[in-house]
Image: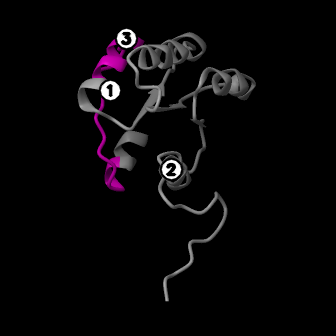
Amino acid sequence: MIASAFADMGFEVISGPLFQTPEETAKMALEHKVDAVGASSLAAGHKTLIPELIEHLKDAGRADIKVVAGGVIPQTDYDFLKKAGVQGIYGPGTNVVEAAADLLRLLGHNMPPAGEEIEAAE
């Protein structure tokens, strides 16, 4: 659902196959020269699979690729994931538009902080 909504908003989204390994995901990210990877683990593998993905990206010299996580991730695991290098975590109930704005901020686009209005140009 998130990938579909992001594509509707203008992001270029490349969806990988289900049950991809962290190594396969990193390889795909490198081949497509992506700016960010969104990882969703519904199998309680987020504490092992996502940090492993980040390590594969670092080993390939691409620590600059932002990794964000979604899915059913207990809030008690958020600090662990952030320490592992996850840049954004979007759990159930996340507002999709706010998640997109957050991702744009992570990618260095000139977006106001969350909760602030965008001022119209005069």
Q: Quadrant of residue 15?
A: top left
Q: Where residue 29 is drawn, which disc sits there?
A: 1
Amino acid under label 1?
Ala
Rendered location of residue 48, percent (x, y): 56, 10
Query: Outermost residue, bottom direction?
Result: 122
Q: Determine the residue positioned at 46% across, 19% down.
A: 58
How far is disc 3 from disc 2 in space, using C-alphas?
Answer: 27 Å
Q: Quadrant of residue 71?
A: top right
- First in sequence: mark 1 or mark 2? 1
Look at the image and tell me whether residue 55 can be seen: yes
Q: Is residue 113 above or below residue 76?
A: below
Q: Which residues are magenta?
A: 7-29
The one nearer the camera, 67 or 62, is 62
Q: Nearer the viewer, mark 3 or mark 2?
A: 3
Q: Is residue 115 above or below residue 56?
A: below
Rendered location of residue 102, percent (x, y): 55, 50
Query: Pointer 3: what residue?
Result: 23
Amino acid under label 2?
Val
Q: Residues within 10 Å of mark 3 (few under 14, many from 20)?
A: some
Q: Determine the residue positioned at 48% across, 51% down.
A: 104
Query: Pointer 2: what residue?
Result: 96
- First in sequence: mark 3 or mark 2? 3
Amino acid under label 3?
Glu
Q: Nearer the viewer, mark 1 or mark 2?
A: 1
- First in sequence: mark 1 or mark 3? 3
Query: Outermost residue, left direction?
Result: 31
Q: What is the secondary structure assignment of the residue under circle 3? A: helix
